[in-house]
Image (cartoon, rainbow, N blue to C red):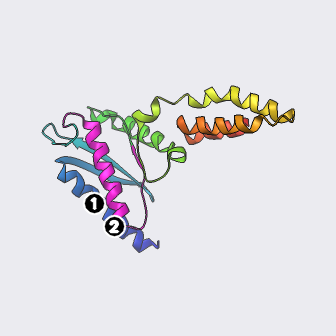
Amino acid sequence: YDYRDQILLKFVVQNALQEIADKHGCRIWMAWMDATRLGAAIQVLPDTQNPQDPQDRSKVAAHIAGELNEWIRNHLKFTVSVGIGSDVTDVSEVSLSYEEAMQALDYKIVLGADQVISSSEVKVNSQAAYGHYHEIRVIASQFKQGNAEWKPLFRRLAESMKQDPMSRQELRMIMDYM
């Protein structure tokens, strides 16, 4: 997209997000962090009604993000991935939540684009890469010995890696190790 189109598309995305947040009775603050990254802080007010769980602020934020993804998918010719940081109660913690959201987006390489990725979903597996090193050593040993057994082991490793999402950095470490 040329520069003017980018400005228009950014305006459209911001307004769509604002309308979705308003619909859910939330306050939102947004800023473009760089040319392709919109940062948003959502304040879920105590009386906000959410069909799934009105008390859980994180679920409200994820629901808003999911609606934004769906709206963009239906109305624009591109997709977005959304990272969600942890719920915070003090403005001084917003930067930490932002960093968590950015780290969650590192898992996009495994989980796929056009997703809402919560930091709470990927924190559980933050050590997933380290569990694969033994498997890689066995595969490498079988390969060096000319044993065809390395192929099914490698397939199993690939399937296992799909089950345990890893960040871009963790995947890069595993690929370097191989």
**Residue type indicated by callout 1:** Ala
Residue shown at 42% from the left, 49% from the top: 115
Residue 143 in the image, given as x and y percentages of width and height = 82, 36
Along the horizontal axis of the image, is 83 left or right of 50? right
Q: Secondary structure at mark 2?
A: helix
Disc number for residue 130? none
Q: Residue furthest right?
A: 145
Highlighted range, magenta: 54-83
Question: In this figure, what is the number of numbered marks?
Answer: 2
Name the residue that disc number 1 marks. Answer: 16
* 27 versus 5 height, above or below: above
* Quadrant in the picture for the C terminus: top right
Corner quadrant of residue 133:
top right
Q: Is residue 88 left or right of residue 83?
A: left
Q: Which residue is mark 2?
A: 75
Residue 1 part of the magenta segment? no
| Kind of residue at badge 2 | His
Residue 173 seen in the current view:
no
Of residues 150 and 113, the one nearer the viewer is 150
